Image: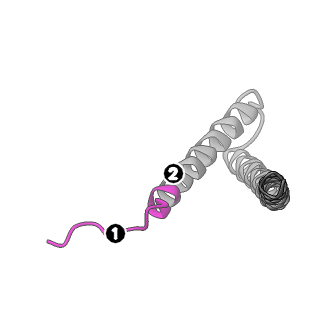
Amino acid sequence: MTGPPRQGSDGALANEVEGYLLWQARIAEAEQRAREFTGPLEWLTSGQREEIERRYVADSLRRARTDLERIAARCASLRTEYEHRYQELRRRCVGVTLAVCAGCTALVALLLAL
């Protein structure tokens, strides 16, 4: 046996499995909430109950997907923003370091010249 497929150090397979399990939990939660919603409606026929539950689950999952897409987009924009800030900070640090080194070199040269 060769074992499970090897993934990079980023754990892409673990992330996919976790995402799948979280989505399955979301489906189970939506189905449970749909049953709880139709439970008190005793006058519904079984066909009507199933249709309402199906629509309730579909609506819940559509809203969950929209929320997840919005969160993912926000995460991507934050990552871009922080990467930009990091690059700017790094440029500043390099600039300050070079200025300090140049100042020290000029001071040493001045002291040696005297």
Depicted 4 relative to depicted 92: above or below: below
Dot 1 falls on a residue whose secondary structure is loop
Nearer-the-camera pick, 53 or 112: 112
Nearer-the-camera pick, 26 or 113: 113
Q: Position of residue 30 (x, y in %)?
A: 67, 43
In the image, 70: left or right of 15? right
**Identity of the residue furthest to the front in this view:** 114
Which quadrant is home to the N terminus?
bottom left
Q: How crowded is mark 2: few (under 14 residues within 10 Å), some or many (20 or more)?
A: few
Q: What stretch is highlighted in magenta?
A: 1-15
Q: Quadrant of residue 86?
A: bottom right
Q: Give the residue displayed 73% in from the left and 53% down from the top.
A: 61
Residue 75 in magenta stretch: no
Q: Give the residue displayed 51% in from the left and 51% down from the top.
A: 18
Nearer-the-camera pick, 45 or 112: 112
Is residue 7 shown to the viewer in this render? yes
Q: Position of residue 31 (x, y in %)?
A: 64, 43
Q: Name the residue under label 1.
A: 6
In the image, 10: left or right of 95? left
Q: What residue type is labelled 2?
A: Glu
Q: Which of the two discs, 2 and 1, labels the residue nearer the N terminus?
A: 1
Tag of residue 18: 2
Q: Position of residue 41 (x, y in %)?
A: 77, 31
Q: Quadrant of residue 113?
A: bottom right
